[in-house]
Amino acid sequence: MATRQLGRSVVLQSLYEWEFYNRAHDLTAIVERNMKEFAPGMDEPEFVWKIVKGVIEHQGAIDAIIEKAAPEWPLAQIAIIDRNALRIGLFELLYANHDEVPPKVAINEAIEIAKNYGGPNSGKFINGVLGTVYKQLPSHDEEEAKARAKREERKKTKEKSKDD
């Protein structure tokens, strides 16, 4: 398992445990124990801490976005795994450095951890919510414009090579 994917799994497991016990236990201790148990000698432990810290710091805003993007699913009714996979994905999508974690990578990674740890429909649910949020981002329009320009350039190159 790739280092960052493993890191996200540790974050998910830690947030799950913390929330399962109604946040009564120390999150830092949970993360440290899970890193030691599931990711000993991990190359980028700071990546785990960055996500944990970011999810907690932005949780109010992230939860509000989840509620807006999935209005038929009150936050308390979303499975703990799915809720925390969404939080991780939304933190990376909205607050992380996009040079470090591009938006589509953030979405795909959240979907993968949901598929690995959630229920049979978790991946689809996460994809739907994160896709909805992504389409509303200003950077989405920029990425679409760049992709369109690349397709046009390839098309022109193909046409030119046919003419030669």
Image (tube, rainbow, N blue to C red):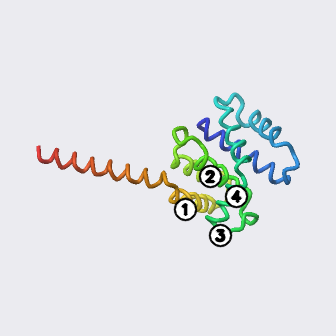
Q: Quadrant of residue 65?
A: bottom right
Q: Mark 2 points at which residue?
A: 90
Q: Mark 1 points at which residue?
A: 132
Q: Identify the secondary structure beneath mark 3.
A: loop
Q: In which quarter of the image is the N terminus?
A: top right
Return the x and y of residue 59 as percentages of the image width and height.
72, 52
Are dots 3 and 1 in contact, CB under 8 Å? no
Q: Tell me the kind of residue under disc 4.
A: Asp
Q: Residue 61 carries which label?
A: none
Q: In which quarter of the image is residue 61?
A: bottom right
Is residue 155 rendered to the left or right of residue 125? left
The residue sitting at the bottom extreme is: 72
Per the model, the C-alpha gap separating discs 3 and 1 is 12 Å
Return the x and y of residue 84 as percentages of the image width and height.
70, 53
Q: Quadrant of the C terminus?
A: top left
The residue that appears at 69% across and 44% down in the rendered structure is 54
Per the model, the C-alpha gap separating discs 3 and 2 is 16 Å
On screen, residue 140 above or below 44 = below
Return the x and y of residue 2 as percentages of the image width and height.
59, 37
Q: Mark 4 points at which residue?
A: 63
The residue that appears at 61% across and 58% down in the rendered structure is 126
Q: Identify the secondary structure beneath mark 2.
A: helix
Q: Tell me the kind of residue under disc 1.
A: Thr
Q: Identify the secondary structure beneath mark 4.
A: helix
Per the model, the C-alpha gap separating discs 4 and 2 is 9 Å
Q: Earlier in the sequence, mark 3 or mark 1?
A: 3
Return the x and y of residue 132 as percentages of the image width and height.
55, 62
- Residues 68 and 51: in front is 68
Per the model, the C-alpha gap separating discs 4 and 3 is 11 Å
Q: Tell me the kind of residue under disc 3.
A: Pro
Are dots 4 and 1 in contact, CB under 8 Å? no
Q: Which mark is residue 71?
A: 3
